[in-house]
Amino acid sequence: MKTYEYIITFKSRNQKIVDRISLIMLIMAVVVFIFSIFTASAIKTILFLSIIVLLMVGYTAYLKMRENKGQAVHYRIALLLAACGWYLLPHGLIPFIAYLLAALLEKQAKFPQEVAFDKDEIVINSFPRKHYQWSDMNNVVLKDNLLTIDFKNNKLVQKETESPVTDTMEAEFNEFCKQHLN
């Protein structure tokens, strides 16, 4: 694993929208599964869907209690359960894939965006991870808790840092960037 000289974390994106989308998806799945329980003819399907609905509702209630205590929550397990339920249904392949993707991407969507700097490159921790050479940059400046990355292709990234940066650290970082930009 590579060690970077500076890692700057940006202020977190609003995670509530990801949580709301996850909850809407889970509610839709529960409604469809309950309807399917009453209309299915196979006992196995009724049993599995009933268990999945109970697990989804129970796990989501547990997560809501954790959220009320101020703890971080991730709905990926409930989304995986929903994906399993969709897989059991006829014509449920497309929703199965959508719920599986949502479960896999939910944590990444909530992960705080970071930028790492070392003498060789700049890495933006996103999905997918982006690597840039110093030669791709016009300027990189940290000022008043605002990181500005000016690319030579006229792209500009400007984001607020998660935590306050001291004047000393700011000057040290800016000097590091100046050395590698030249």
Image (cartoon, helix red, strand yellow):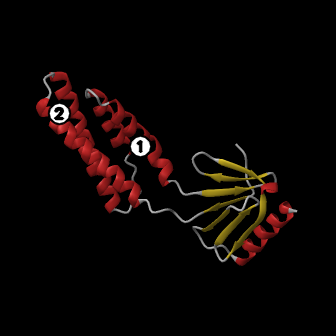
In the image, residue 2 lies at what x, y percent? 72, 46
Q: Secondary structure at mark 2?
A: helix
- Quadrant position of residue 177: bottom right
Side (left or right) of 7 relative to 11? right
Residue 121 appears in the rendering: yes
Side (left or right) of 12 relative to 87? right
Compared to residue 144, the image places residue 89 above or below, namely above
Residue that mark 1 sits on: 102
In the image, residue 149 lies at what x, y percent? 70, 64
Q: How packed is label 2: few (under 14 Cα within 10 Å), some, or many (20 or more)?
A: some
Report the residue at 45% width, 41% height from top: 104
Q: Label 2 sits on what residue type?
A: Ser
Decide which of tag 2 and tag 1 comes sooner along the chain.
2
Q: How packed is label 1: few (under 14 Cα within 10 Å), some, or many (20 or more)?
A: many
Marks 2/1: CA–CA distance = 22 Å
Q: Give the quadrant of the C terminus.
A: bottom right
Residue 58 appears in the rendering: no
Q: Give the quadrant of the N terminus.
A: top right
Side (left or right) of 86 relative to 124? left
Report the residue at 40% width, 50% height from top: 74
Q: Secondary structure at mark 1?
A: helix
Side (left or right) of 32 relative to 148? left
* Nearer-the-camera pick, 83 or 47: 83
Compared to residue 133, the image places residue 11 above or below, namely below
Disc number placed over residue 141 in the picture, else none: none
In the image, residue 23 lies at what x, y percent? 31, 51
Extreme residue toward the right, this view: 182
Q: Label 1 sits on what residue type?
A: Ala
Disc number placed over residue 36 in the picture, else none: 2
The answer to whether marks 2 and 1 mark residues whose Cβ atoms lie closer than 8 Å is no
